[in-house]
Image (cartoon, rainbow, N blue to C red):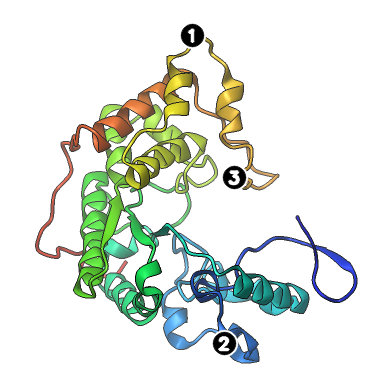
Amino acid sequence: FFFKNYGNARNITIYDYGACTVPQLLLGLDDRLDDPGYATPTSSQVLSVKEGDDDANSNATNSSSSSGSHKNFNPCRQDPYYLQYTQKYYSERNTSWDFLIINDNTRNPARADHRALSLQFLEAQYIPMLLQLQSNTPQVVFLWTHAYRPSIPRSMKGLEDIGNFTSLTGAGVRSYQHLLENYGISSYVAPVGLAFLLVYEEHPDDIWPSLFHNADHLHASPAGTLLQGLIVHYTLFQEMPTGVQEWLDSPQDDIEYLKNLWSRARMMQHAWEPPNPFPTKQVAQYLYQVARRIMVEHEMPKTYIHYTHGEVLNNEV
């Protein structure tokens, strides 16, 4: 919880939602937040969030969805004190960012209509902001997310094969890169999907399922976030994290070190859901080597298809 005086002579305890919008976060100011209608999604924003999408948050950053319908809106518009605080806080920080990590809903880069919509949104929203930052433009990193087989209802038509699902997602992410290149903006890709695919090929029945949240087999578990974190770390800093390596090389099987990696993380499941276990040291060692093989040795999973001509799943799913 966030304890702060919001200028009304009293302390208010509210949840820390972070910045209200991406423009506020990147630029320090979003004038539209003063518009009462800003919380109402436009038709194009509604199109970007369909029932069953991977992430409940709209690409538009100013509305959220519950089961695909816009029942809740930007929390900053719900609490005037928090809105006032964030506007003052970000306008005075004048912060420059080193990195901007962007990820799409996992199926979207693989599907024609959704990939096109994401490209439109990047061009209409993110690219103008990045160009406005000029010399302070952060290094953009696209997160190539993992393929999955969900245990919850979700249309996977055309994406049943994990290798092809991963490959089409990667092709879509590269199309996002190419769009930024057209505007002179460089970007990197954190190939988390490739790492997950390598685990799938080698341990499809034991370690690969453990990479997923046990309530939906869709979002990452602690083991999955460890693998993702290793890939992202190398993408950002061009080296594997030394602290994890030192722990893995030590003779002690100290699970407390591993738990500390998540000590400041958000909760990963609801209270009524079974807890997701931490990976064992043996599994963590294997995941570390998987990340190293992908990032340092540039190993490619055998079932990965390197699409180079904008291949995309044309049927709507």
x and y percentages locating residue 315 in the rendered image: 23, 69
Q: Which mark is residue 35?
A: none
Residue 172 visible at all: yes
x and y percentages locating residue 275 in the rendered image: 62, 36
Q: CA distance from mark 1 to mark 3?
A: 29 Å
Q: CA distance from mark 3 to mark 2?
A: 32 Å
Identify the residue under disc 2: 32
Identify the residue under disc 1: 251
Q: Quadrant of residue 32?
A: bottom right
Q: CA distance from mark 2 to mark 1?
A: 56 Å
The residue type indicated by label 3 comes to Met
Identify the residue under disc 3: 268
Q: Which one is nearer the viewer's eye here, 262 or 216? A: 262
x and y percentages locating residue 301 in the rendered image: 20, 37
The residue type indicated by label 1 comes to Pro
Q: Secondary structure at mark 3?
A: loop
x and y percentages locating residue 278 in the rendered image: 55, 29
Label 2: how many residues lie within 10 Å, few (<14), some (14-19) or many (20+)?
few
Relative to 205, is 39 above or below? below
Q: Secondary structure at mark 1?
A: loop
The reply, left or right, for residue 67 in relation to residue 100 is: right
Residue 315 visible at all: no
